[in-house]
C-alpha cells in the first residue's frame, strides 16, 4: 500500500503506542480517585497536558482535552452569543454546525484560497459579532490562512477569535504566545497520535462555558478522562515538536517531487490553492477531463490511497465547497485530487504513484 492521504489520518507511531500500553493494561486507575493508583493516572494526564501545551507555545492550564476536533470546534461555537463570522473554506465540522445558527456571516476567499482581510475588517466594523472562526490551514488545499493578521484585526475590534488548527499543528510552527487567538482546536490523529482525542486551547482570561458538565477537567468537561489516549496525545505532541523541522523538510521534498512529476507527465494539470502559503505536505491538483471520484477508486485498487477532498465529506455527492469558494467551476471541483504526504513517505512511493496516476488519468480522460 502506498498511502498518500495523511491529512485524513495518520498511523500511531511505535513510541506513541508504547507510551499508551501501560495505561490500558497495568496503570488503568481512574484519575479522579484519591489513592495512588488513581493519582498515577492523574499525573500522566497532567504530563500529557504539558506536552501538548509545549507544542503550541501555551501554558498547560490553557489546554482542555476533548474527544476530538469536532467536539473542540463545536464546543466553542455552541457557546457563542451573537453572530458568528467564519471563512468560506472551513472544515465540515464548522460548516455543519453553523447551518443550525441564524446569525452567521461568511468571509470570502480569493482564487488562491486566502481570506479577504478587508472584508473581515469591514464586517467587524458594521456588525455585532460574537466570534470569528478561521481555519489555520485548509484540509483540502493546504492553504495557510493569514492567522496573525486575522487575530490582530479581531483583537483591534475586541472580538473573540477561534481557529481550527487541526491540519496545521505538528506540520508548521505554531506559537499562541505570539498570536492573539482566544481558542484553538487540535486533534492527535493528525500528527501520529491516537484517534478519539483532541483538545481546545483556551487563552487565559477568555470566556468559556462547558458543553458537557461534570467535575473533570477542572469543571470544563465532564466524563472520565480517556487516560491512554491522552497519554498518547502527549507523546505524539512531544515527538512532533522535537522533529518538526526535520519532518517538514522531508514532507516538502516529497510533495514537490510528486507535484513536479505530475505536472511534467500531465502538462494540462493545474494546482488548486496558493503555492507559497501552504502546508509542506499537501498538494491539491486538478486534472482536466478526469473524474476524481473514479480515479480515486481506481488508484485504490492499485494500492495507492489518495483523496478528492476532505475525509469527513467522502460520502458527499456535491463538489468541494472549498474549491467552489475559490472560484473553481463545478467541473474543475470534480477534477481535483488531494495528495498529502508525511515524513514516512519515500521517493520510491512517489515514483510508483506518479506512474500509476499518469497512466490512469490518460486512460479515463473524458
Image (cartoon, rainbow, N blue to C red):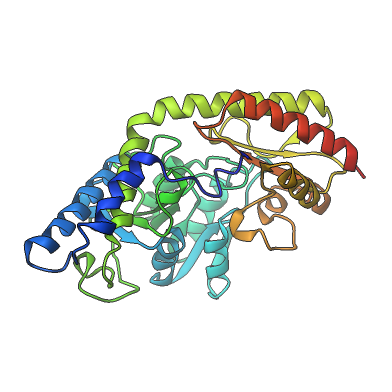
Q: In the image, what residue occupies the spot 43% across and 56% down?
A: 195
| Residue 106 in view (yes/no) | yes
Q: Which corner quadrant holds the C terminus?
A: top right
In the drawing, does residue 65 fall left or right of residue 249? left
Q: In the image, what residue occupies the spot 70% across and 32% down?
A: 353
The residue furthest right is 366
Q: In the image, what residue occupies the spot 74% across and 41% down?
A: 302
The residue furthest front is 25
Q: In the image, what residue occupies the spot 17% across and 59% down?
A: 42
In the drawing, does residue 136 fall left or right of residue 58? right
Nearer to the camera, 2 or 246 = 2
Q: Compared to 51, does 246 lie above or below?
A: above
Q: Which corner quadrant holds the N terminus?
A: top right
Which image quadrant is residue 224 in? bottom left
Which image quadrant is residue 14 in? top left
Nearer to the camera, 305 or 286 = 305
Q: Where is residue 86 drawn, in percent x and y?
A: 53, 58
Nearer to the camera, 259 or 4 = 4
Q: Compared to 161, does 361 lie above or below?
A: above
Q: Where is residue 115 drawn, in percent x and y?
A: 58, 46
In the drawing, does residue 285 fall left or right of residue 226? right
Nearer to the camera, 262 or 131 = 262
Q: Where is residue 329 drawn, in percent x and y?
A: 80, 50
Disc count in the image? Answer: 0
Which image quadrant is residue 360 in? top right
Q: Where is residue 237 drawn, in percent x and y?
A: 33, 42
| Residue 202 in view (yes/no) | no
Q: Compared to 8, does 101 lie above or below?
A: below
Amino acid at each position: 500500500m502506498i498511502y498518500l492521504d495523511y491529512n485524513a489520518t495518520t498511523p500511531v507511531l511505535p513510541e506513541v503506542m508504547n507510551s499508551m500500553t501501560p495505561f490500558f493494561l497495568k496503570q488503568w486507575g481512574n484519575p479522579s480517585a484519591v489513592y495512588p493508583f488513581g493519582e498515577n493516572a492523574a499525573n500522566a494526564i497532567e504530563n500529557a497536558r504539558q506536552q501538548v501545551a509545549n507544542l503550541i507555545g501555551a501554558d498547560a492550564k490553557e489546554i482542555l482535552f476533548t474527544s476530538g476536533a469536532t467536539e473542540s470546534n463545536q464546543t466553542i461555537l455552541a457557546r457563542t452569543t451573537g453572530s458568528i463570522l467564519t471563512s468560506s473554506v472551513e472544515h465540515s465540522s464548522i460548516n455543519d454546525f453553523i447551518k443550525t445558527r441564524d446569525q452567521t456571516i461568511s468571509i470570502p476567499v480569493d482564487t488562491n484560497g486566502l481570506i479577504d482581510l478587508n472584508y473581515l475588517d469591514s464586517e467587524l466594523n458594521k456588525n455585532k459579532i460574537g466570534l470569528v472562526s478561521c481555519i489555520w490551514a485548509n484540509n483540502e488545499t493546504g492553504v495557510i490562512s493569514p492567522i496573525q493578521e486575522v487575530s490582530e484585526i479581531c483583537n483591534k475590534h475586541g472580538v473573540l477569535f477561534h481557529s481550527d488548527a487541526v491540519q496545521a499543528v505538528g506540520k508548521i510552527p505554531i506559537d499562541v504566545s505570539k498570536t492573539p487567538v482566544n481558542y484553538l482546536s487540535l486533534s492527535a490523529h493528525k500528527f501520529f497520535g491516537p484517534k478519539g482525542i483532541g483538545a481546545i486551547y483556551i487563552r487565559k482570561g477568555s470566556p468559556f462555558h462547558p458543553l458537557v458538565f461534570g467535575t473533570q477537567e477542572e469543571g470544563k468537561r465532564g466524563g472520565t478522562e480517556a487516560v491512554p489516549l491522552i497519554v498518547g496525545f502527549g507523546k505524539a505532541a512531544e515527538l512532533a515538536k522535537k522533529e518538526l523541522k526535520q519532518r517538514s523538510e522531508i514532507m516538502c521534498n516529497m510533495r514537490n517531487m510528486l507535484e513536479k512529476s505530475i505536472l511534467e507527465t500531465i502538462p494540462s494539470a493545474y494546482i488548486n490553492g496558493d503555492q507559497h502559503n501552504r502546508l509542506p505536505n499537501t498538494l491539491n491538483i486538478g486534472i482536466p477531463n478526469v473524474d476524481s471520484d473514479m480515479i480515486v477508486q481506481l488508484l485504490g485498487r492499485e494500492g495507492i490511497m489518495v483523496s478528492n477532498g476532505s475525509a469527513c465529506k467522502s460520502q458527499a455527492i456535491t463538489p468541494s465547497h472549498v474549491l467552489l469558494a475559490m472560484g473553481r467551476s463545478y467541473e474543475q471541483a470534480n477534477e481535483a485530487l488531494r495528495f498529502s504526504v508525511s515524513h514516512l513517505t519515500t521517493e520510491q512511493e512517489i515514483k510508483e504513484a506518479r506512474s500509476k496516476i499518469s497512466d490512469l488519468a490518460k486512460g479515463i480522460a473524458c
